[in-house]
Amino acid sequence: MSALQTWNLDPAHSEIIFKVKHLMITNVKGEFRTFSSQIISEGSDFSKAKISLKIDTSSIFTNQEDRDNHLRSADFFETEKYPELVFEGTSFSRLDDENYKLKGNLTMKGVTREVTLDVEFGGLMKDPWGNEKAGFSVTGKLNRKDWGLNWNAALEAGGVMVSEEVKIQAEVQYIKA
């Protein structure tokens, strides 16, 4: 067993994006602009790594100020009462050289539920300053109602304004500590 290795998120080269169906016809994209994450691995072997993530809920950005303010309100994230989303990985299973299944507990608005995400390992690389970096692409889906984000509006023609399903995409780079 090799020594435990800490990897810290490089926020300048990372993003967390979500997409939600609007009016049942198109996706609206948003992002969280402030978050931190850490991986504890056995050397450069990421199978069984421990992964944690904290997201500042007030950093939500959808390029529309009124919508962002609505998302920060009690209808959605209630950012003053719940300033963070927290993810604690419970397992990181290697499927093959590039693909992993990440399971963990996501806490949002005081509710904790297990989520499963698909992770593609982009590889290891040294940057021009000699820092060892690891890159990952993360995708998944969740139902926002599972965390009490219930707001919606019925449409005259049937259906709802905002889908319950939220698609998550993250591109994350970590720096070996």
Image (tube, rainbow, N blue to C red):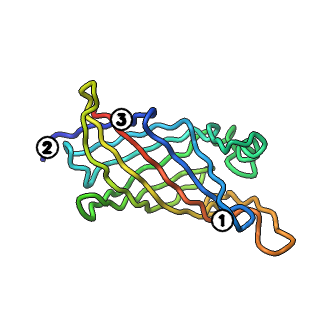
At 23% from the left edge and 59% from the top edge, which residue is drawn? Answer: 97
First in sequence, mark 2 or 3: give its number: 2
Residue occupying the far left of the picture: 1
At 63% from the left edge and 60% from the top edge, which residue is drawn? Answer: 144
Q: Quadrant of residue 64?
A: top right
* Left or right, 75 with reference to 59: right
At 53% from the left edge and 41% from the top edge, which residue is drawn? Answer: 55
Q: Disc 2 marks which residue? A: 2
First in sequence, mark 1 or 3: give its number: 3
Q: Secondary structure at mark 2?
A: loop
Cα separation between marks 1 and 2: 43 Å
Q: Disc 3 marks which residue? A: 8
Residue occupying the far bottom of the picture: 158
- Looking at the image, is mark 1 or mark 2 nearer the viewer? 1
Q: Amino acid at mark 2?
A: Ser
At 61% from the left edge and 65% from the top edge, which residue is drawn? Answer: 165
* Left or right, 164 with reference to 177: right
Q: Amino acid at mark 1?
A: Glu
Cα separation between marks 1 and 3: 32 Å
Determine whether 40 is above or below 145 in the image.
above
Q: Quadrant of residue 154?
A: bottom right
Q: Disc 1 marks which residue? A: 164
* Left or right, 126 with reference to 55: left
Q: Secondary structure at mark 1?
A: strand
